[in-house]
Image (cartoon, coloured by chain):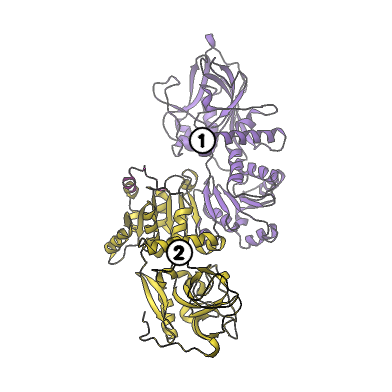
Chain colours: A yellow, B purple
Amino acid sequence: MQASAASQRRPISAYGYEQAKALVFSKYGEPGDVLSLHGHSISPAHSDKLTLRFLASPINPADINQIQGVYPSKPTFTTDLSTAHPIAVGGNEGVAEVISAGSGVKNLAKGDWVIMKQPGFGTWRTHAQTDDSNLLKIEDKTGLTPVQVGTVSINPCTAYRMLKDFAQLKEGEWFIQNGANSGVGRAAIQLGKLWGYKSINVIRARPEGTEELKQELKDLGADVVVTDEELQEKGFSEKVKEWTNGGRERLPLALNCVGGKPATAMAKLLSPEGHLVTYGAMSKQPVQLPTGLLIFKDIHFDGFWVSKWSKENPEEKKRTVDHVLSLIREGKFKDTPFDEVRWDFETKQDTLVAAVQGTLGGFRSGKGIFVFGST
Amino acid sequence: MQASAASQRRPISAYGYEQAKALVFSKYGEPGDVLSLHGHSISPAHSDKLTLRFLASPINPADINQIQGVYPSKPTFTTDLSTAHPIAVGGNEGVAEVISAGSGVKNLAKGDWVIMKQPGFGTWRTHAQTDDSNLLKIEDKTGLTPVQVGTVSINPCTAYRMLKDFAQLKEGEWFIQNGANSGVGRAAIQLGKLWGYKSINVIRARPEGTEELKQELKDLGADVVVTDEELQEKGFSEKVKEWTNGGRERLPLALNCVGGKPATAMAKLLSPEGHLVTYGAMSKQPVQLPTGLLIFKDIHFDGFWVSKWSKENPEEKKRTVDHVLSLIREGKFKDTPFDEVRWDFETKQDTLVAAVQGTLGGFRSGKGIFVFGST
């Protein structure tokens, strides 16, 4: 990703109008085909309205699926941004700073940082105007970077709730997960470690750097890291038995973002009454359930979707976010590696769209995040 | 099944010794190869011992799997029945009458009817001696037949708990099930109807008699009966939408004893947050889960095994059994059709083994149950 070389001051029009830009689409399709950079102006904030300046907005895989029209959570198409035909703004996660607030706004003020209460807001934009019903205030931004706050809502929250809400894991017990080097995977390793859970982490073997990645995850707190070939080898269950002290330490939780055979392989390792929680489907293969696991081992197969959870549990979401941010502040929770894509006022459409399209690629050490230039 | 033509009085030895016979096996294999009829004597009941005379013991598919050695619940091999090598008695369900009780027995007396607290007792036998820890007393046998009481533990309990314990079904809501003409299926139709639930029932189409079977299940209380071909036809979800009042009536529960594609087809019809509960695997195909159902529709995939449930919930099992028996007594719960196999003292081994082996066959309108001649 190329960030533009220099940052110029953004022109500000008279009477407090903000010149804003947003990455938008008017129909579903491949991001490279349907995304465009749309310029518009935002009127001064009045009554219960707030004007926001975005600080950092990640490019998550779900954002791409949403643009492709294959994601169940649909964007809002609107003509509010002064267009002849309805458009939607891409992106679902991000952090913004309040730059002005109408007189009717109560709980937020200029300078506050906010994140989106739920996905669907449209976060790939320099500015937005909204009321406070869509926003969660960051109570204490001290010591936090925009990238840290802008990426707390989806991956760390997903890992946090899956560890807490399904299998009643206790200290000294184990969980297993695939896609362990993903944002969710890295969050699960670290949160698990903090809470005294041990983890078996499955990654895809790659042409090179597999051992380095294993070490990287162990440095984050992973107890065991294996490739999916190792997971599916004969005798792997014997190894798991060794690690879990002859099976005396329970393994009641598996986190699955891959699907297919690697998911079934994890399910077979679970202790009776365990849960396999699916939150992604990178392999695009369905999960296969040997019936015996369901009936005789009483294994439960559940799913987790942070969008739905956030909508139904706004208070719990705020507590979860606050807790993760406090862990970051205390140095107990490390950032996932990101490719920062600088978005200044003069950054070209092609650069921004290429960053989104790039997220469709194969192996990536991290993923893209728009980091906005200050005005 | 041929019952023996005449019933002779069973010889009773001096001093209250009972002459007993049991269908036993000393190693796993096909029932026809490993089952034999074993004669032994039972000493008079003393201290906390009870002597039982069996009245009726069904032949369930799980009994066969247990003899084959492929069932997770293993039988107890013992030399208690005066054999040189350990043997196990077949059968897991049944009803018996107390014919004598030692002086230390408190809660049971001669003439009482009992069922087994858990599977694994060995019920294919004319008599047994045990203490009361293995037995559930039938509080009121008035108006009940041995076949009714002897078949209440597994199928009706399975249907009852699956309807009650998974999806919090409310009156006016729907469930869907395959294998709807099985013992569990017929129990679910009737209990569901009594509790105000509506049902979509899936059966296998058969060379003839499909319409008659549909009518038979409707007479039991089924709202809709379809074949699995109909279930998997395009446009079936539209029909479900019509039946459920445009989808306004929820369909949060599916009961699965088949597996494979018909199970996935049912899962796709469920309302968000619904449960597919698997209790059998007649097709021997694993259940396939499209990931979207798990993540975005929050469908849960669980299993139910009445053996495990009975072990963990003895009090609840007693309440469930008592409730079903009271419904039978009130004429609100009809029997599943059975092929009665008469077992008198002189009935030949071949007849009994053939009855067990026959349960392995294909379509059956009912299934076998040993009904013991009175002494």
Q: Can residue A280 be seen in this view?
A: no
Say which of A314 and A132 sits in front.
A132
Labels 2 and 1 in the same subunit: no
Q: Could you say which disc has been placed on residue B63 in the image? A: none
Residue visible at 62% across and 40% down?
Answer: B365
Q: What stretch is highlighted in magenta?
A: A240-251
Q: Can residue B23 be seen in this view?
A: yes
Considering the numbered disc 1 on the image, is that residue within a helix, a strand or a loop?
helix
- Are the two marked residues, 2 and 1, in contact with CB atoms closer than 8 angstroms? no
Q: Is residue B170 above or below residue B352?
A: below
Say which of B262 and A134 sits in front.
A134
Magenta stretch encompasses residue A250: yes
Q: Quadrant of the C terminus of chain A?
A: bottom left
For residue A242, what is the image quadrant? top left
Say which of B84 and A302 sits in front.
A302
Residue A337 at what x, y percent from top left?
Answer: 35, 69
Q: In which quarter of the image is the N terminus of chain A?
A: bottom left
Disc 2: which chain? A
Q: Main secondary structure of the magenta part?
A: loop
Q: Is residue B310 left or right of residue A237?
A: right
Q: In this view, does A202 lie to the left or right of A130?
A: left
Residue at which label 2 appears: A284
Residue at which label 1 appears: B311
Q: Distance between the residues labelled 2 and 1?
A: 39 Å
**The disc labelled 2 sits on which kind of residue?**
Lys
Q: Quick one: which residue is furthest to the top in this view? A: B14
Q: Is residue B64 above or below residue B259?
A: above
